[in-house]
Image (cartoon, grey):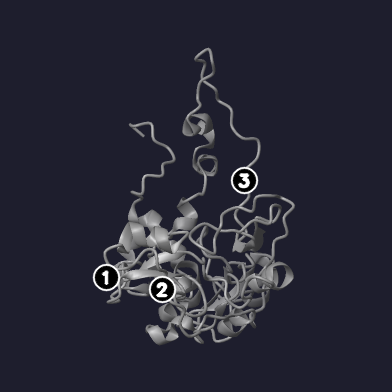
């Protein structure tokens, strides 16, 4: 604040922002200023005074809607090289930020988008790959330090890049000349090898099946291998998420893995590289209903709680699939807590 800084893009975000990019990172300066500095919007945008040096106190008339997490066709109007199904979310591929037009069709799943609009050029079972080049071995223990492609099929395709991969290149030559020129012939791309048969697939029924098992809650993401890796329940690692620990209080392991480690979903879930290409959900988990249900504690006491993650003390996360939901607390209380000692009804 002392340096008149509002929204910046300096690559020096604090850890609590890094572990929760959807809450803190925005694709444009305008969206960041709108989210956090509406009262100083012009200042944040760097345009706070008019030609007479009078301060402008104008703010946008409407708030930008939240990113939907749904899928749309990039370059839909131009039909350019980027014509492909991408996701309306923040982060690296397949996220591509906000859909460029209010009238563009949004699809609930990658598979629906692909089978409807891009089936002739995309593999409709796998939404994970950017088709760009990156350096293999930079973020892993691989002995080979060479340029590979984030795509399906035979080499030089190498499947999903590691989750911390940041630098991608449009061509092999660009990747090689900037990184591996001492180890590879930059004028000669790697030869095509045999096809892969372990590519990731997604399931439209993943969440229905997963939640039917009543999975444990309380998983949160950790990006430091020295403390833990991927999604854990270790209380000692909570310090890495301060002040946003409560955001993950009711997340299941699959929800945590999907939201933070999509590109190694199987490894996040199963803890080994064999599960790296395991079946994953085609879309984010269903939204919580914000309705009420009765919850039984470990000592068989019961209370009416709300199906939500954060915001009020009565939140208790997702209810089991067969749980009856009520529109209000009073309705839940009347059916389950009426007549008991010290009833809150």
* Image mark for residue 190: 2
Q: Which of the two discs, 3 and 2, labels the residue nearer the N terminus? A: 3
82 relative position to 221: left or right: right
Q: Which x, y percent locates residue 205?
A: 64, 81
Number of marks in the image? 3
Secondary structure of the residue carrying numbered label 3: loop
Q: Quadrant of residue 38?
A: top right
* Residue 19 appears anywhere in the view: no
210 relative position to 188: left or right: right
Q: Which of the two discs, 1 and 2, labels the residue nearer the N terminus? A: 2
Q: Which of 284 and 262 is in front in this view?
A: 262
Image quarter in which the C terminus is found: bottom right
Q: Which x, y percent locates residue 273?
A: 38, 83
Rendered residue at 44%/40% (across/down): 7
Q: Which of 94 and 272 is in front in this view?
A: 94
As displayed, is residue 227 above or below residue 240? Answer: below
Secondary structure of the residue carrying numbered label 2: loop
Q: Quadrant of residue 281?
A: bottom right
305 relative position to 244: left or right: right
* Residue 143 appears anywhere in the view: yes
Q: How far apart are marks 3 and 2 (CA)?
A: 45 Å
**Which residue in the structure is indicated by mark 3?**
64
* Image mark for residue 227: 1
Q: Residues within 10 Å of mark 3 (few under 14, many from 20)?
A: few
Q: How far apart are marks 3 and 1 (CA)?
A: 37 Å
Q: Which x, y percent locates residue 316?
A: 52, 70
Q: Which of 271 and 290 is in front in this view?
A: 271
């Amino acid at each position: 604040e002392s340096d008149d800084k509002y929204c910046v893009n300096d690559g020096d975000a604090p850890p609590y922002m890094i572990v929760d990019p959807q809450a803190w990172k925005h694709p444009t300066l305008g969206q960041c200023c709108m989210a956090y500095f509406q009262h100083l919007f012009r200042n944040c945008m760097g345009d706070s005074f008019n030609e007479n040096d009078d301060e402008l106190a104008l703010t946008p008339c409407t708030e930008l809607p939240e990113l939907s997490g749904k899928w749309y066709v990039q370059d839909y109007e131009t039909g350019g090289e980027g014509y492909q199904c991408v996701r309306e979310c923040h982060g690296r591929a397949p996220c591509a930020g906000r859909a460029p037009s209010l009238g563009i069709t949004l699809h609930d799943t990658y598979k629906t988008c692909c089978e409807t609009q891009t089936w002739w050029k995309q593999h409709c079972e796998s939404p994970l790959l950017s088709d760009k080049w990156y350096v293999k071995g930079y973020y892993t223990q691989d002995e080979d330090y060479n340029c590979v492609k984030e795509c399906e099929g035979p080499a030089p395709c190498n499947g999903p890049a590691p989750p911390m991969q940041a630098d991608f290149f449009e061509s092999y030559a660009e990747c090689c000349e900037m990184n591996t020129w001492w180890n590879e012939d930059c004028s000669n791309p790697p030869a095509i090898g045999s096809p892969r048969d372990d590519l990731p697939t997604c399931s439209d029924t993943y969440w229905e099946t997963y939640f039917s098992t009543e999975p444990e809650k309380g998983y949160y993401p950790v990006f430091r291998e020295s403390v833990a890796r991927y999604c854990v329940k270790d209380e000692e690692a909570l310090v890495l998420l301060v002040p946003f620990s409560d955001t993950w209080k009711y997340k299941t392991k699959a929800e945590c893995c999907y939201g933070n480690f999509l590109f190694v979903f199987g490894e996040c879930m199963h803890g080994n590289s064999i599960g790296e290409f395991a079946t994953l959900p085609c879309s984010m988990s269903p939204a919580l209903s914000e309705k009420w249900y009765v919850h039984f504690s470990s000592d068989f006491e019961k209370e009416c709680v709300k199906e939500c993650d954060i915001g009020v003390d009565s939140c208790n996360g997702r209810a089991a699939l067969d749980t009856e939901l009520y529109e209000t607390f009073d309705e839940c209380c009347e059916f389950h807590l009426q007549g008991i000692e010290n009833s809150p009804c």
